[in-house]
Image (cartoon, coloured by chain):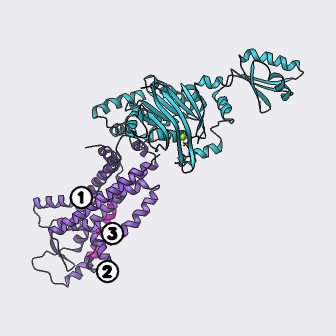
Amino acid sequence: MHYGFLTIYWRDMIRFLRFKTLLISSLIQPALWMAFFGIAMSANFDRLGASIPPIPGVPEVQYLTYMAAGVIAMTVLFTSLFGGIVLLFDKNWGLMREIMASPLPRDQIIFGIALSGMTKSFIQVIIVMVFGLLIGVTFFAGYSIGHTVVALLGIMLFVGMFSIGFLFFSAAISISMETPEGLQGIITLLTMPIFFASNALYPVEAFPPVLQAISTVNPLSQLVNGVRYFAIGDNFTTMGIHYVYTTAEILLSFTILVIFAVAMFGVAWWRFKKAVVT
Amino acid sequence: MSTSIIEVKDLEHQYGDFKAVDGISFTVGKGEIFSFLGPNGAGKSTAINVLITLLKLQKGEASIAGYDVRTEPEKVRESIGIVFQEVTLDRDMTAWEILEFHGRLYGMTRSDRKERIQEILELVKLEEKKDTFVKKLSGGMKRRLEIGRGLMTRPIVLFLDEPTIGLDPQTRMRMWDYIKAVNEEGTTIFLTTHYMDEADNLSDRISIIDHGKIIASGKPWELKNALGQDLIYLETSDNSKTRAIISDLVSVSGVTDKGKGILITTNDDGTKVLPLLIEEIRNSGISVITVNLKKPSMDDVFVHFTGRELRDDKPEKISIAFGRR
Ligand SMILES: Nc1ncnc2c1ncn2[C@@H]1O[C@H](COP(=O)(O)OP(=O)(O)O)[C@@H](O)[C@H]1O
Ligand SMILES: [Mg+2]
C-alpha cells in the first residue's frame, strides 16, 4: 500500500487550518439557511401539518429538524464540489509541476485531496450540527449515549462516502480546467439541480414524476436519507407526512453512494492520466 | 555502461503543428555542467519538460542516468532534481514546510528528511529563514530554496531552467558560485539560459539552440575560437577598399561589414596583427578613424552562428516570454 496520499493530505490540511476564512465562510451559508429559512418556514409548514391528526406512537418532528438534515447535506455538497479547486490553483500557480514531476503516483493525488476534503466535511458537519442543536433542532431526541454515538458514526459514514464521490468529481474537473471561473461555472450549474431535485428541503411526494425519479437516484437524497435515519429515526412524521425507513432502504441509499464514488473515481483517474501540466 | 548521464538522439516536440524542438541530439557526461544557450522561444524549456517526463516524448530517444525517458519515467523521476523556470513555491508555506513536503513527495523517511533538511538549509544559507513564509523571502532566497529543494533527494542530475532569470547582477553571481559548488560535490548539471555570460561562466560545454535546433556545440573556448583568436573593429575613410586590401592577409581569417565599419577576425594574436593592419591600410592612402580590439565574447559567438544579436530587452522577445502563460 502506498501512503503518498498522506503527503497531499498533510499539505492541504495545513492550508485549511491556516486560512480560517475559508472554514468560516463555508459555515455562514448553512447557518443562514437554518436560522432564516428553517425557522421562518418551520412556522408555516408546522401549521400545515397541524391540521392532520397525529399517528399514535409515532414521534412528530418540526420542519426545522427535518430540513436541518438537508442543510447538512448541502454543506457537504458545496464543500466537496469545491474541494478539488486547490488542484486548479496549484496548476495555475505552477505548483502542480513539482508534484507531477515527482515519483508520486497520480492516484495518490486524487486520494489525498479526497481525504482532506472529507476531513473538512466532517469538521463542518459537526459545527453545523452543534449550531442546529443550539437553535432548536431536535436531533438524537430520546437517544441513549450509546445510540447517539452509533448515530453519529452512521452519519459520518454517509457524509464520508458522499463527499468522496463529489471530491473525485471535483478533482477530475479541476485537473481538466484552465481557470477557476470555469470550475465555478460548472459547479453553479450543477448545485442548483442537485439541491432542488432532492429531498433536502421538502418531501418529494409532491414532485412531478420526472423530478421524483431524479430525486430518488440523486446522491444528495441518499445522504439526506442517511442523516435523517440516524439523526431522527426510522419512523416519524413531519408536516403531516409519515416517514418510515427500512434497513434495506438505507442500505440501498448507501450502495448508491458507493457506486457513485467508484464511478467518479474512474472519471478522475481517467482525467489525471490524460493531464499534462507544464 | 558509458559515463554519459544524459543521452538524447533526434528529439522532436510539437505543439499542434508547431515544432518547438526540431531534432536535437546531445550527450552530457557525468559531473559536467552542460548548458542550452538560446533566446526566448528557442525550445529550451520544452526540451527540459520532455526530459523530466512532464511532456510526453513524441519522437526520438532520450535516456537519463541509464533510464529510458519513454519507458521508465518513474526511474527517471527518482534520479533527477528540477528547478523550473518560473517560481514553483507555495507562497503560504514556510521554507521548512516546502522542503518537508518535497521529501515526503519523494518518499524519504522521517529521519532522512530531518537530517537532509538541516543540511540543505545550511547549504543554501537559509537556516534562519526556516520558519519564514515564502512570500516574505527575497527573489534570491526563493531561488536558493528551490535549488536546495532540487538537491534534497540527492539527484544524479539537476535540471536548472533559467536559474538566474529576474535576479539582480550580484545575486546572479552568488548563484553561479553556488551552482559551481553543487557541481563540485558531484551533481551533474543541465541548465538553460539566455544569458551569454552565464553560459560562458558556468558551463563545461554549451549547445547553442535556436528555433528548436542545436546550431553549435562545444566548450566555451572552442565556440569562441571558431571566430578566430581576436576581433578587430575598424572604421576607415574607405571601408570597401580596406576590405579588399586586408582580406588576403594570412593573419586575417574573415572580414564582415558591421555598422559604419568592418569586423575582422584574426588567426593570430590581435595585439600583434593590429599594427600591421593599420600600416597596410595607411600605405594605401586610407585613413583610419576608429579602432577597437577585443576577445570574442559569447555574444559574438551567438551573432556568428545565428546571424543576429541576442538581447534580453527587445520588446518582442519579452512578449514571447510572457505570452506563454
Ligand atoms: N504549451 C504550449 N503550447 C503551444 N506552444 C508552446 C507551448 N509552450 C511553448 N510553446 C512555444 O514553443 C516555443 C518554445 O518555447 P519554450 O520551450 O518555452 O522556449 P524557451 O524555454 O527556450 O524560451 C515557443 O515558440 C513557445 O511559444
Ligand atoms: Mg524557457
Q: Which chain is purple?
A: A
At mark 1, the secondary structure is helix
Question: Are callouts 1 and 2 both on one chain?
Answer: yes
Q: Is residue A163 left or right of residue B128?
A: left
> How would you rate the neighbour count of disc 1 (Cα within 10 Å): few for under 14, some for 14-19, many for 20 or more?
some
Q: Are marks 1 and 3 in contact (CB under 8 Å)?
A: no
Q: Which chain is cyan?
A: B
Q: Residue at x 42, y 63 (%)?
A: A186
Where is mark 3, residue-wise? Answer: A195
Where is mark 2, residue-wise? Answer: A208
User: First in sequence: mark 2 or mark 3?
Assistant: 3
**What number is the disc on residue B41?**
none
Residue A138 in view (yes/no): no
Q: Amino acid at mark 1?
A: Ile
> How would you rate the neighbour count of disc 3 (Cα within 10 Å): few for under 14, some for 14-19, many for 20 or more?
many
Residue closer to the observer: A20 or A123? A123
Q: CA distance from mark 1 to mark 3?
A: 21 Å
**Residue bounds of the magenta highlight:** A27-42
Residue closer to the observer: B76 or A54? B76
Q: Residue at x 60, y 45 (%)?
A: B320
Q: CA distance from mark 2 to mark 3?
A: 16 Å
Q: Mark 3 — on which chain does it sit? A: A
- Residue A73 figure quarter: bottom left
- Residue A187 figure quarter: bottom left
Magenta stretch: includes residue A17: no
From the image, state whether disc 2 or disc 3 is nearer to you: 2
Where is mark 1, residue-wise? Answer: A126
Where is residue A41? Give x, y as percent.
28, 76
Q: Is residue A276 left or right of residue A2?
A: right
User: First in sequence: mark 1 or mark 3?
Assistant: 1
Question: Are callouts 2 and 3 both on one chain?
Answer: yes
Q: Amino acid at mark 3?
A: Phe
